[in-house]
């Protein structure tokens, strides 16, 4: 063959084989580097190259066998061809140098460069390659099958199963990472909403409920004027109705039902006819579970009870949705009551304020595992009710006790956070 084919023809054939080697090397890296979730998405959108690549990767052993078969065949052919060319040019001495030169050329132009390109832009390489590999695999299937049988047999001895190639589901934390790293592909607001949805399982009804001592409702044992005042001034559309204490709740009243009652008809008996059965949920229920329960039961409000059946608070559908999308409405008066900016990087804070709400409104990072209020967090840490002017640091935030009642902290002063620190210093 070396005597019959001109040197230029042999050089051209060598160049063609080098291109084939680069194609096989680069396409292998590209196919293995594809993001499987992006690949599935493009496949469902109808992208032909993505569909074929997805089919090939369902059995990666077959496509790898095909690529290695082609690549090795090409590389061995190049080695033989270089020997012929260099021998024709300079004899046995030139053949030795030709082997070294071929190694360098293959390493740079048929391995490193195409594989780097494929790793940087896997879809640009893999999708066109899939158009070639899919029919080629059918043509060479007997040879590839025999190769894979031998290779899979070796793997089987080590406990590896080639059929175990299903796309694995992402865990919640892995999905959080995907959403967080989406960057400009998802707006900051939508990204925050998606992360909040993923966190619903970690947040319970205890974290968002209106606590027992702040529940506003209708006491049937109260004076008529007091009942009318609560109904007329209520900022809520649904109120619990109870006798003497909230623990003796009798139902939930939707205030719109009072629109058809004349003033003289607003009696205790008429109220009782309008109330719905109370809906109770156990404390510690994850928000994701409670959201589903609200949907199934067509409820919008629930009373949170402890293991003894005592009412701990009220949670509403709006409370859960606000965990996802943020506050629907804001009450400036409430904000001023909870946090007052003193203008020197310090804030006077109501110690009964909810920690999660403080973190959200002030962009703080106070610990949320454990007590729900700032008062509870400080008392748990100190294991006593502190005296005024007591100072401590929680998660890097300097805190000074300003005002204390007999049984609770009323007001604290919180300064600017130091360098990130452990949860409790």
Image (cartoon, rainbow, N blue to C red):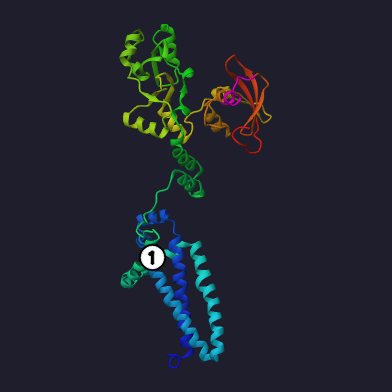
Residue nearest the viewer, comparing 131 with 149? 149
Q: Position of residue 211 (x, y in %)?
A: 47, 21
Q: Residue furthest bottom?
A: 3
User: Toward which corner of the image does residue 365 lie, by quadrant?
Assistant: top right
Report the label total: 1
Question: In the picture shown, does residue 102 fall above or below 341?
Answer: below
Q: Is residue 3 visible?
A: yes
Q: Position of residue 259 (x, y in %)?
A: 35, 17
| Residue 385 is inside the magenta segment | yes
Write the start and end of the magenta stretch as one range: 377-386
Q: Residue furthest front?
A: 157
User: Toward which corner of the image does residue 396 lie, by quadrant?
Assistant: top right
Q: Position of residue 118 (x, y in %)?
A: 48, 65
Question: In the picture shown, does residue 166 fall above or below 206?
Answer: below
Q: Is residue 130 visible?
A: no
Q: Residue furthest top?
A: 223
Residue nearest the viewer, comparing 159 with 338? 159
Question: In the picture shown, does residue 345 fall above or below 136?
Answer: above
Q: Which residue is mark 1?
A: 154
Q: Residue at x 37, y 18 (%)?
A: 255
């Amino acid at each position: 063959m070396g005597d019959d084919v001109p040197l230029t023809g042999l050089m051209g054939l060598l160049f063609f084989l080098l291109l084939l080697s680069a194609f096989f090397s680069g396409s292998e890296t590209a196919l293995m580097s594809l993001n499987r979730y992006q690949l599935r998405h493009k496949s469902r959108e109808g992208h032909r190259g993505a569909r074929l690549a997805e089919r090939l990767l369902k059995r990666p052993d077959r496509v790898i066998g095909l690529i290695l078969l082609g690549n090795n065949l090409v590389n061995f052919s190049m080695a033989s061809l270089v020997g012929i060319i260099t021998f024709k040019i300079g004899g046995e001495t030139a053949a030795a140098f030709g082997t070294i030169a071929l190694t360098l050329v293959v390493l740079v132009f048929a391995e490193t460069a195409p594989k780097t390109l494929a790793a940087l832009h896997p879809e640009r390489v893999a999708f066109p390659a899939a158009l070639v590999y899919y029919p080629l695999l059918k043509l060479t299937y007997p040879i590839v099958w025999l190769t894979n049988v031998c290779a899979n047999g070796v793997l089987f001895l080590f406990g590896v199963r080639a059929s175990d190639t299903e796309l694995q589901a992402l865990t919640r934390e892995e999905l959080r990472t995907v959403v967080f790293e989406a960057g400009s592909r998802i707006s900051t607001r939508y990204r925050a909403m998606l992360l909040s949805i993923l966190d619903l399982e970690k947040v319970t009804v205890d974290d968002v409920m209106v606590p027992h001592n702040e529940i506003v409702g209708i006491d049937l044992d109260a004076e008529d004027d007091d009942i009318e005042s609560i109904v007329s001034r209520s900022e809520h559309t649904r109120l619990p109705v109870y006798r003497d204490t909230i623990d003796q709740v009798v139902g939930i009243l939707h205030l719109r039902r009072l629109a058809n009652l004349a003033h003289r008809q607003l009696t205790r008996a008429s109220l009782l006819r309008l109330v719905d059965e109370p809906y109770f949920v156990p404390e510690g229920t994850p928000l994701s579970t409670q959201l589903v329960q609200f949907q199934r039961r067509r409820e919008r409000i629930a009373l949170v009870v402890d293991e003894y059946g005592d009412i701990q608070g009220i949670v509403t559908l709006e409370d859960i949705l606000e965990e996802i999308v943020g506050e629907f409405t804001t009450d400036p008066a409430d904000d001023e009551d909870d946090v007052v900016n003193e203008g020197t990087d310090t804030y006077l804070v109501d110690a009964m304020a909810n920690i999660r709400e403080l973190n959200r409104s002030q962009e703080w990072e106070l610990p949320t595992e454990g007590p729900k209020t700032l008062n509870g967090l400080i008392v748990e840490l100190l294991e006593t009710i502190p005296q005024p002017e007591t100072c401590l640091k929680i998660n890097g935030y300097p805190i000074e006790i300003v005002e204390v009642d007999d049984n609770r902290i009323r007001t604290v002063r919180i300064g600017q956070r130091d360098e990130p620190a452990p949860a409790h210093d």
